[in-house]
Image: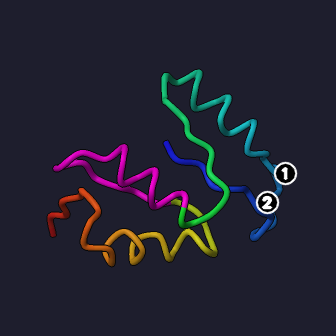
Amino acid sequence: MVLLPVRDAVPSPAGRASRGEIEEVAVRAAARVRQVDGLAQAGDAVAVLAAPGDVVLTMGVGEVAGLGALLLSPADRPLTFVY
């Protein structure tokens, strides 16, 4: 799991979850978590972590929407996408 900074883009009645809280829950569920500070670092992390045939799923609002385009643009990224 690659975790970008968490922002209050959409108000929630459940309140705000911090990046640390999200990481804690993911680790308890046996996920490996890598925290990054922005899209460029997220793209680099996904390029290293994803193997051919893996599915990359992004969740969130705002800047994370640009991650797909970032991953598809560089020719040297070791990712294989199946449509």
Asked whether 72 falls inside the magenta stretch, the response is no
- Residue 46 is situated, as x and y percent measured from the top left of the image, at 41, 52
From the viewer's perspective, is residue 16 above or below residue 83?
above
- Closest to the observer, 44 or 60: 44
Write the residue at 52% across / 60% down: 59
**Are the residues at dot 1 and dot 2 in contact (C-beta closer than 8 Å)?**
yes
Write the residue at 24% across / 48% down: 54
Identify residue type, mark 2: Ser
Can you say which quadrant of the picture contains the C terminus?
A: bottom left
Label 2 belongs to which residue? Answer: 12
From the viewer's perspective, is residue 23 above or below residue 11?
above
- Closest to the observer, 10 or 82: 82
- Residue 79 is situated, as x and y percent measured from the top left of the image, at 24, 58
Range covered by the magenta-colored residues: 41-58
Q: Mark 2 packing: few (<14 Cα in 10 Å), some, or many (20+)?
A: few
Write the residue at 42% across / 74% down: 70
Q: Mark 1 packing: few (<14 Cα in 10 Å), some, or many (20+)?
A: few
Left or right: residue 49 versus residue 34 is left
Asked whether 49 falls inside the magenta stretch, the response is yes
Write the residue at 56% across / 40% down: 34
Residue at the limit of the structure toward the front, as seen here = 76
Tag shown at residue 15: 1
- Residue 75 is situated, as x and y percent measured from the top left of the image, at 25, 73
Q: Mark 1 and mark 2: span between their CA atoms? A: 5 Å
Identify residue type, mark 1: Gly
- Residue 40 is situated, as x and y percent measured from the top left of the image, at 53, 66
Left or right: residue 20 versus residue 46 is right
Q: Secondary structure at mark 1?
A: loop
